[in-house]
Image: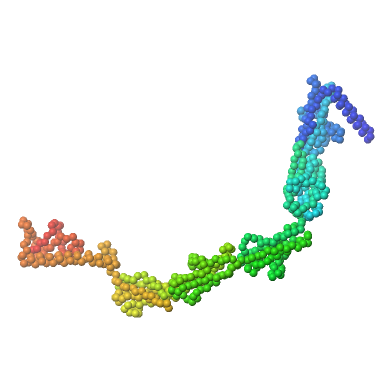
Amino acid sequence: MRRCRLARFALGCLFFLASHCSRGADGNVEVSMSDVVEAEVGKTAIIRCGFSIPVNSTYAYVNWFYMDSHVRKKIIYMVPGMESPEELELKGRVRMGEDFALTVSKVTPQDAKVYVCQVGAGSAGVGENRTELRVSKAPETPEVKVADSAASLSVMNEIAVCVSRNGYPTPAITWYKDENLLESDGEEINIRFTITKESSGLFTVSSSLSAQVTKEDRKAIFHCQVNYSLMGANKTSRSNAFNISVNYPSVNISFVISEPNREIKEGDKVTLLCEGDGNPPPEYTFFRVKNGTEEKLQSTDTGKLVLENVMRKDSGLYQCQAFDLQSMDELKADVKLSVNYLEIPTITKDPPRHLKEGDNLLLTCGSSSSKPLEFQWKKEGKVIVRERVLNITDVTHEASGSYSCIVSVPEIPGLSHRKQVSVNVHSKPRLFPVEEVVFVHEGKLLSLTCAAVSNPRPSILWTTSVNSTLMPNSTIITTDVSNEQRNSTFSVFVTKEILESEIRCSARNNQGEASHRFKMRPRIEEQTTAGSPTSTKQGSESQGVIIVPIVICILAIALLGAVLYFLHKKGKLPCGRSGKQEITKPEAHKDEIVVEVKSDKLPEEAGLLQGADSEKRSAGDQGEKYIDLRN
């Protein structure tokens, strides 16, 4: 074994001397390479080898080595027309290109080495150079695990642990509070760093932060950051921000009403809030103070006291006591609760007895409240007055009805009450007949209606001027419309006795009586030229004016005919016409008197002048009209 080591050492020395002697001897072969090549884990790295040899020479071989603990290990070599890899560790991932560059695929952290390119050119000598391959990989985003327990004051507390996995080369972790870098000082801040090399050759780093916290740290924002190098560039990745829980005793407590600016009224829900400034919160106990005595209400760790449907009796002083388990101190705070109220109003009526028309009415509304009040009176939804007192003078029946007094507290919206009172004004009846003169038909049915309004509701009586009792075969239908109105309908067939009388409707109650007379008038109906009947007095009279002149004309014509006939019999009336023509009469009608009168009368009127046989004239007798009187 020892001999093998000596042999290897001797070969190494000879190789070193040979290489240096060859360089120094000729210096004609020059090899150029980059000092550093960057590659990312899992990707491909290309290490280039450039060389120059004398013009009349060619290369004899190219060898690639990597350094392993100052020992060269051949990776691959090439002689003209042949390439041969030798390193088993890189087998399948390494090759040499036509430009003699070394290509390493699927780079791993273990590939981060120094690589040597050696070129031999026969008698021109040997030249070589080297490149460092640097491998890198970005670590995973750091994750933070915050300590489960809250931090206490004045002691060193573990705050959180930050972990970042699978990075290369080894990343570093730093801590920040409110964006300010935290550095370990061994007293108030302690940071511990751990590196773990995975089987893949990558590194997982973790860092724990411990510190002495203050009360103000409960609002601080912490985060960790991993710093690493990737492809020659410095980069960072930060964790999510977080807060920590800090335990500290309560020094002060506040005790308030949840809605301090709201006016509280009876029926409201009220929440009292008690809060200490420590963490965790203390235990709260609520009391009500009456006459210097504390009445315990409840204990809770939420600091809320809820009062449902408060009343004025709930007004007073309330106290919160907080007991801190860290400092073992007891703290107290008070709050005063004022519950506003409004009494249901009362109404005083003057006079209290039933009113009569003409009386005066005074309604007074009264109430009490914790705040100034506002009054208003309404009737049927309409505001009458905005005062406490409602004064109505000389009341009438229309003053009856329901009145509402509405009392409210202007300073407290929604706080109002109302009270109603009914007013009844006793009044004598009032009648509402439809008409005074009624035109009727004898033998036909007549219906008359009276509507009477009063308080109390009246009774209605029907009578006639001829007989104080009702006519036989008459009917009365009475209907109660409301508590104050009654309607009555009287129906009877019209007789001569009805036409000669007046019908009276009377309404009566304990306040008085009212009556109305209906006067009967006959209704005259005639046919117009169009055959339509008329039923008014004016229409009847116009028809009479037309008929009377017609009758007079007919009588005058008849009288004239009689006079002419008489003169003819006495022979005092000459016959014939002006000389040349003789008026003759057919033989069959010699003893008849022919009277023909030109007239504009209607055909039926003219017909009254025709002869007894009512014969019509022939077509030849329709010329000039004349009167022919013959024996």
Q: How many numbered markers are drawn?
A: 0
Residue drawn at point x = 76 percent, y = 63 percent: 330
Question: Residue 423: percent from the left, percent from the top?
Answer: 48, 72
Residue drawn at point x = 51 percent, y = 66 percent: 386
Looking at the image, residue 114 sits to the left or right of residue 622; the answer is right
Determine if residue 184 is in view.
yes
> Front-most of 546 and 426?
426
Question: Residue 329: percent from the left, percent from the top?
Answer: 77, 62
What colour scheme governs how the chains and residues are painted in the rendered image of this protein? rainbow
> Front-most of 581 and 500?
500
Question: Residue 287: percent from the left, percent from the top?
Answer: 71, 67
Looking at the image, residue 169 sits to the left or right of residue 542; the answer is right
The residue at the far top in this view is 56
Looking at the image, residue 311 sits to the left or right of residue 75; the answer is left
Residue drawn at point x = 81 percent, y = 36 percent: 112
The residue at the far right in this view is 2
Position above or below: 481 against 182: below
Determine if residue 79 is in view.
no
Locate the C terminus and report the quarter of the image it occupies. bottom left
User: Where, by quadrant of the figure, is residue 335 drawn?
Assistant: bottom right
Question: Residue 556: percent from the left, percent from the top?
Answer: 15, 66
Looking at the image, residue 436 sits to the left or right of residue 411; the answer is left
> Front-most of 181 and 14?
181
Locate the N terminus and report the quarter of the image it occupies. top right
> Front-most of 77 and 237?
237
